[in-house]
């Protein structure tokens, strides 16, 4: 985690620690994810730091800098809360399964590489979060690699992976994997204390002061001279934290066939950041690494956050100095172990075999996260998924129906080649809402169906007299859609072909009545079922009135 302040390291540590004390309690009450762990994340920290540094130098004026950080956190929380109150959790639905798979894989790969700093004992590293920068930093600082740190890191990592293997082979021994991280921290502390690890190139956490930071309510700064930076940082990080936190929560929920309520998540994130800004905490969300550790430890409810919060409080009050000897390599090994199991090669291969477009979305998320950043990778993948959805919306499916012999069923003739047509009648099924984005396509598609059918009927000496439009799958229609149907009717009237409406839904029927479309084609041309419509065409509609050429 990058430091927000470079001049007052103990204050920064306490701010980060408090961010793992108060917000988790709030989330445990209002959040909907059972696995999400609450804490700070690198992307949001970097954005807040970079934005506020344009107004205030953290070295020359650390108090003002810190007050603007708390103000940015408040603005971020208010933004998130407003989004939740207005029930914009529907945004979560744009995170497709392929997006989540790629996002998880890319993030896990990236975090594994970032932990090499601790494993290899590097003193200098990059603040960037893309794979290229991380690899370049490792190569550039390769002379700093300490074999002592590397050996200890590998031992810890092998131990953690072995406990996971034991859990997989014998599920009853799940507790072995659950206590493994605590064992690593405890053994690491003892080892570092006894061997004076810091003298051998193994970095430790360092000095930690006891106590909880006081309220920061009076530190909030809305000075017009500086407020633009907290507003910018707050708005940007609000969206990034929501996208990242909800994506991570949903990722782990999918593994357990559970659901995450996007609206509840937004409200929970908003409240925990608003209250956090009053209690010396900066922006928090759902870190991937901590959540992965929770999941791999077998946590099933939000009591994990409560326990973490209580432990953090006790640590801040009584045990902070004890953990000064915790080797950073131990923490890196714990995080890397959790990441390795979250790169789902088999699932990506399954997407490749079943749906190439979904596989592309997955890879865009993976490489975007790994080579650019988590937020950019997520947005690129979601954007591609939205483009696919728009293509489906703008080019909806339509089909010609035929009768299944010896039944009253009418099905797609392409899916059921044995289905037979009805003399002088063309039955078409529309399966999507009709509105401005697809109205023109649907109009042209209907007329093309009629042209093709008319050509076939002419060869057989059986002309088309009726076009039945099954609207059972049309959930809504706008004015542009109604006008498209009017144009269809006019075009077909010229050819002495009558349009019949079948099974319109309530909302669609109301719109057709209000726009007087039903009056123009005649109520006698609206039927409940295809069978009724066919019978009506055969025996009732001898010569319906001509179509009126007025605008709806």
Image (cartoon, helix red, strand yellow):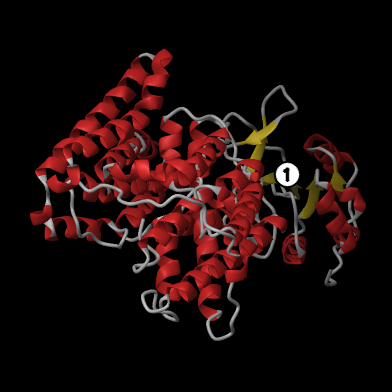
Q: Looking at the rendering, which quadrant does residue 322 occupy?
A: top left
**Relative vertical location of residue 418 with respect to residue 42 in this rendering, above or below:** above
Residue 435 located left or right of residue 527: left
**Residue 450 visible to an observer of this rendering:** no
Q: Position of residue 73 (x, y in %)?
A: 55, 64
Q: Residue at x 54, y 86 (%)?
A: 225
Which residue in the structure is indicated by mark 1? 425
Q: Position of residue 266 (x, y in %)?
A: 62, 53
Q: How many numbered marks have been drawn onto this rendered protein structure?
A: 1
Q: Residue at x 20, y 35 (%)?
A: 194
Q: Quadrant of the C terminus?
A: bottom right
**Relative vertical location of residue 19 with respect to residue 261 in this rendering, above or below:** below
Q: Residues within 10 Å of mark 1 (few under 14, many from 20)?
A: many
**Residue 492 visible to an observer of this rendering:** yes
Viewer-closest of 120 and 21: 21
Q: Position of residue 69 (x, y in %)?
A: 50, 68
Q: Residue at x 84, y 48 (%)?
A: 506
Residue 208 located left or right of residue 146: right
Q: Quadrant of the N terminus?
A: bottom left
Q: Looking at the rendering, which quadrant does residue 517 occupy?
A: bottom right
SS at badge 1: strand
Residue 110 located left or right of residue 222: left
Q: Residue furthest left?
A: 143
């Amino acid at each position: 985690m990058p430091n927000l302040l470079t001049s007052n390291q103990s204050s920064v540590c306490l701010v980060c620690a408090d961010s793992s004390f108060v917000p988790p309690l709030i989330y445990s009450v209002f959040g909907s994810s059972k696995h999400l762990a609450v804490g700070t994340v690198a992307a949001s920290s970097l954005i807040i730091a970079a934005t506020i540094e344009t107004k205030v130098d953290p070295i020359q004026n650390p108090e003002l800098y810190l007050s603007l950080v708390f103000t940015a956190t408040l603005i971020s929380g208010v933004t998130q809360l407003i989004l939740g109150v207005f029930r914009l959790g529907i945004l979560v639905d744009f995170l497709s399964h392929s997006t989540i798979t790629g996002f998880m894989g890319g993030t896990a790969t990236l975090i594994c590489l970032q932990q090499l700093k601790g494993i290899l004992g590097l003193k200098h590293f990059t603040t960037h979060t893309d794979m290229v920068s991380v690899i370049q930093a490792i190569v550039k600082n390769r002379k700093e690699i300490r074999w002592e740190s590397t050996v200890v890191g590998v031992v810890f990592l092998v131990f953690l992976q072995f406990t996971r293997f034991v859990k997989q082979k014998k599920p009853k021994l799940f507790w072995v994997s659950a206590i493994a991280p605590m064992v690593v921290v405890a053994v690491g502390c003892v080892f570092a204390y006894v061997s004076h690890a810091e003298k051998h190139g193994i970095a430790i956490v360092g000095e930690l002061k006891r106590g909880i930071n006081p309220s920061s309510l009076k530190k909030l700064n809305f000075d017009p001279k500086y407020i633009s930076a907290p507003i910018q940082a707050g708005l940007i990080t609000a969206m990034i934290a929501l996208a990242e936190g909800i994506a991570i929560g949903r990722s782990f929920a999918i593994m357990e066939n559970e659901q995450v309520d996007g609206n509840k998540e937004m409200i929970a994130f908003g409240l925990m950041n608003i209250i956090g800004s009053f209690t010396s905490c900066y922006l928090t969300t759902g870190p991937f690494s901590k959540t992965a550790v929770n999941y791999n430890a077998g946590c099933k409810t939000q009591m994990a956050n409560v326990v973490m919060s209580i432990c953090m409080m006790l640590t801040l009050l009584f045990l902070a100095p004890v953990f000064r000897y915790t080797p950073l390599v131990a923490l890196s090994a714990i995080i890397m172990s959790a990441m390795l199991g979250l790169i789902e090669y088999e699932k990506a291969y399954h997407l490749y075999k079943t749906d190439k477009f979904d596989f592309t979305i997955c890879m865009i998320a993976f490489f975007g996260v790994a080579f650019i950043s988590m937020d950019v990778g997520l947005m690129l993948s979601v954007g591609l998924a939205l483009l696919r959805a728009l293509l489906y919306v703008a080019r909806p499916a339509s089909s010609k129906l035929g009768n299944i012999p010896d039944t009253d069923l009418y099905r797609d003739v392409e899916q059921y080649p044995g289905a037979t047509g009805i003399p002088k009648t063309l039955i078409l099924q529309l399966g999507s809402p009709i509105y401005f984005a697809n109205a023109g396509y649907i109009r042209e598609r209907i007329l093309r169906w009629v042209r093709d059918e008319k050509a076939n009927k002419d060869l057989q000496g059986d002309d088309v007299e009726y076009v039945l439009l099954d609207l059972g799958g049309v959930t809504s229609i706008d004015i542009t859609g109604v006008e498209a149907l009017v144009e269809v009717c006019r075009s077909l009237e010229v050819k002495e072909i009558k349009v019949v409406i079948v099974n319109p839904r309530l909302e669609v029927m109301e719109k057709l009545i209000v726009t007087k479309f039903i009056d123009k084609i005649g109520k006698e041309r609206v039927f409940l079922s295809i069978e009724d419509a066919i019978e009506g065409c055969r025996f009732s509609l001898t010569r319906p009135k001509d179509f009126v050429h007025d605008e709806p």
